Amino acid sequence: MMKKISSTTLLGTIFVIGVLMILLATPIALAIEPTGGSVTEVRSETAPADTPGTHDAISGNVSELTIYGYSTTQAWQGYFGNVSGTIQLADANDNVMYNWSLANPEGEVYASTNSSISWTNIQCFNFTATGTYEDESGNGGTTNLNGTNLSILESMFNIASTDVDGVDETFSLIGAGTHDLFYTANQQFSEGECRSTRVFDSTGQGVSNNFEEVLLYEPVSKSIIFAALLEEASVLGFDGNDYDFEMLVLEDGHGTDTAVTTYYFFVELE
């Protein structure tokens, strides 16, 4: 014998089916995320050793000297160069329906030691975060309250708190006027929201708004991300040549450490 279905149950079933059909028919907007960038090394250099100065010693004399010298940092690697590419319309198999070539691309170049980043959770890096790794997914566009902080980050790269080339001495800018507004994976970071620095242009120390770099954090993968904001027009870099970006990344070269640090590069073009 067939079991009778009440009108209430039938109406409920029809309602659920209707809601599912609406959800399935509703388009889902996906965040535009940074993608891996193809990297080609053009040149890699370091500062030469200076010629030693001299002074003639004379027995019986005492001499006061003023000595000035340079030492290469043991905590940072510098990157600089130009970015080219296109904005495209393509499917999941990377079949391109249309693209737009960019003569002077806007956007950002990102570098991280992690190759897999949950971009929608991207945040400003917080020097005073708790150091406890609680779940902060879904808080993209903010500043991390938990997770890696300044002390943990510097210890990862063998940087002493008193080092003149430490992280806080380098990314010392924050607040209005320190970096431009930018977007990462549809997350907005307002002017001066994140810790930032200005890498030197052709005039020397970065007092202009050129070559801005921002320090970011992604809580799911515990990733530190260095973000260089692309210049919209040609800017003369530290060596007098035109570049789209300049950036610094951490690398431990202290003591006897000669191991390299592999960085993965991503780009988001506008």
Image (cartoon, helix red, strand yellow):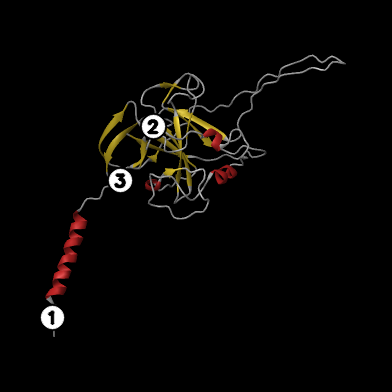
Left or right, 144 with respect to 60, comes to left
Judged left or right of residue 207, residue 232 is left
The residue positioned farthest toward the right in the image shown: 60
Name which of mark 1 and mark 2 comes first in the sequence: 1
Q: Using the image as rendered, state which of residue 38 and residue 1 is in the foreground.
A: 1
Quadrant of the snapshot with the C terminus: top left
Q: Are marks 1 and 2 in contact (CB under 8 Å)?
A: no
Q: Residue at x 42, y 47 (%)?
A: 117
Q: Amino acid at mark 3?
A: Asn
Q: Which sits earlier in the primary sequence, circle 3 or circle 1?
A: 1
Disc number placed over residue 180 in the picture, else none:
2
Q: Residue at x 51, y 27 (%)?
A: 43
Residue 87 — which label? none
Q: Amino acid at mark 1?
A: Lys
- Above or below, comparing residue 206 to residue 193 in the picture: above
Q: How much space separates mark 3 and mark 2, taking CA atoms?
A: 34 Å
- Name the quadrant of the N terminus: bottom left
188 to 139, vertically: above or below: above
Q: Which residue is mark 3?
A: 93
What is the quadrant of residue 229 in the picture? top left
Report the residue at 79% width, 14% height from top: 56
Task: Estimate the x, y position of residue 91 in percent, counting from the top left.
Answer: 27, 44
